[in-house]
Amino acid sequence: MKKIAIAGTDIMCSKFIFGTASLFNAGDERERAALLSAAAEQGFTHFDTAPLYGFGMAERDLAPLLRAHPALTVTTKVGLYPPGGTEQSARGIFLRKVAGKLLPPLSRPVKSFDLGRAERALAGSLERLGRDRVDIYMLHEPERALLDVDAWVGWLEGRRKAGQIRHFGIALPNAHIAPFLSEASGIAPVIQTIDSLDERQADCLTAAGRPLQFTYGYMSAARQRGDTRPARDILGDAIRRNATGAILVSTTKAERVGQYAAIAGDGE
């Protein structure tokens, strides 16, 4: 798969990176492991996860893959936490997700940007991932008005000097990015945000003189607007749209991983 240098970092990763938000839906532990292994075998070198994904299960699922392939890089996040904690059983997670369809608070994320909790969260993520360092550590959908930016930047820089994180930034929808591009830019050297071919939400970054680093959402947005073109055409346009950064894709089907890799291999 084509590799891309992420602007503002020393990370060189696959043009498509693998998102694990829906990994829990891929089946049992063996099926999830097979999906992740297929992604690595097809050239995905960067994996995106968070404590929220699979209520901690996605990070744990990645650990064996990361041990087997030390050169792989990973993003995880802080600030959104699973209700019930990150140490629930697969059965418990499934039941909570099902019950949450009837009673949404049962599966609703818990948001907290308390630095004491962040300290524990980072330690937990490192333990679940089986690594001493996270390549990119992102604040997960932060709200500028609720964030002590100076305190957070100081803490993140401290964790970087301690060798626990390599780079840091924010992951959030474009509607909330503007304050982080002006007075709070120090907390956002790396940005991951949604984008699409028609609405071009990430234009707010280029308008501010920022390169596109990590974007996602092209396939889902295209399908929602009725675009029935093959994935090769949609994602090919996405590669041309985000020529400077990496594009997050995800699937629960191992056979699609190779299709994605072939598209990225054809990228310009």
Image: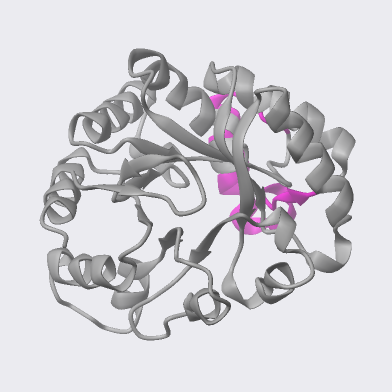
Camera sees residue 181: yes
Q: Quadrant of the N terminus?
A: top left
Q: What segment is highlighted magenta in the picture?
A: 85-111
Which residue is rendered at x = 13% and y = 50% of the image? 265
Which residue is rendered at x = 77% and y = 64% of the image? 184
Residue 178 position in % (x across, y down): 68, 76
Residue 160 position in % (x across, y down): 68, 31
Which residue is rendered at x = 47% and y = 34% of the image? 74
Viewer-side residue, 194 vs 212 = 212
Which residue is rendered at x = 14% and y = 76% of the image? 229
User: In the displayed structure, would residue 241 be above or below residue 157?
Assistant: below
Reply yes or no: does residue 86 show up in magenta.
Answer: yes
Quadrant of the rendered image containing residue 198:
bottom left
Viewer-side residue, 132 vs 128 = 132
Q: Is residue 44 left or right of residue 85?
A: left
Residue 8 position in % (x across, y down): 51, 52
Viewer-side residue, 95 vs 237 = 237
Q: Is residue 8 left or right of residue 217?
A: right
Camera sees residue 95: no
Q: Quadrant of the C terminus?
A: bottom left
The number of callouts visible is: 0
Quadrant of the rendered image containing residue 245:
bottom left
Reply yes or no: does residue 13 show up in magenta.
Answer: no
Residue 16 position in % (x across, y down): 30, 50
What colouring method underlies this structural image?
one colour
